Amino acid sequence: MSEYDRLAWFYNKYWTQSSPELFERALNRVFLPSMPDKAEILDLCCGTGQICARLSRRLYRMTGLDNSETILLLAKENAPAASFVPGDAISFSFRYKFDGVISLFDSLNHILTRDELLSCFKSVRGALKEDGLFLFDLNDEDTFDQNWEAGFSGVEDDNVCILKPAFDLLSGRAVYNITTFLKEGNAWHREDIKVQEQYYSDEEVLELLTLADFHNVQILSGSKDLGIAAFKGRQFFLVS
């Protein structure tokens, strides 16, 4: 069971308000111009399907993979034209290959060890056509060190959310401790959830991509190179 099974409604409500539009802008600049018409694209760690929905409307043939079945139920509602598959980003395979693979919203930071990240990259390599493209983003060290301390709280008539982050610079491990209260009838239901991310340096990522047989890598700053101010501290890797 994924931690995101218990967090699905929170994720769908609070973490997908403005980011899908911004990520589509990033895709427009560095990924989609290289995709053929009606390209087959895999959205790895697709979440509740907002990116799949946007690209499906543009006639790309989208497949979303996520390890939370509750998340995928919401994704199917949000993007009915896409296909969704339960699976683990660390190790997966398909019978067919994709023109492109994307993994956005620092999803791969949730992979917590180098060996697991290498396994993920190898799975992507196996899922791509020979000339396919892979685009993903990761949080940089400054984002974790300087911005991860900012908490979040929200209070509405039927839900309460409290998010307390922490980052350990020595280990590179970031943690979100999340407490939610959801009103069901006349009762309130509490969940305590721990979500972790791991910082990886550019050098580590390049080493692991090379080991996975990727040899052409561009590293792009979300704010400087892509011109999206809200993506300060977000590094994009365009890989072939």
Image (spheres, grey):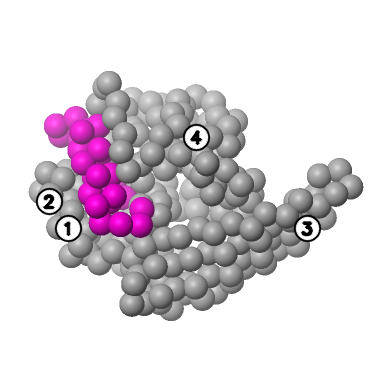
**Residue beneath label 1, please?**
206
Q: Is residue 179 magenta?
A: no
Question: What kind of element bears circle 2?
Answer: helix
Observer-nearest of 92 and 52: 92
- State the extent of the magenta-drawn residues as a range: 111-136
Residue under the image location 89 percent in, 47 percent down: 186
Q: CA distance from mark 2 to mark 1?
A: 6 Å
Q: CA distance from mark 1 to mark 4?
A: 31 Å
Residue under the image location 49 percent in, 48 percent down: 20
**Residue 38 percent across, percent down from the top left:** 33, 25
Q: On the picture, is 82 further left or further right than 34? A: right
Question: What kind of element bears circle 1?
Answer: helix
Q: CA distance from mark 1 to mark 3?
A: 43 Å
**Of the residues tagged 2 and 4, which is closer to the observer?**
2
Measured along the vertical axis of the image, is residue 19 above or below residue 44? below
Decide: few, some or many residues near mark 1? Use Cα within 10 Å; few <14, some 14-19, many ≥20.
many
**Residue beneath label 2, please?**
210
Q: Do callouts 2 and 1 mark residues in contact (Cβ within 8 Å)?
A: yes
**Given the image, on which type of amino acid does mark 4 rest?**
Ala
Q: Is residue 82 visible?
A: yes
> Disc 2 or 3, which lies upstream in sequence?
3
**Residue beneath label 3, please?**
156
Decide: few, some or many residues near mark 4? Use Cα within 10 Å; few <14, some 14-19, many ≥20.
many
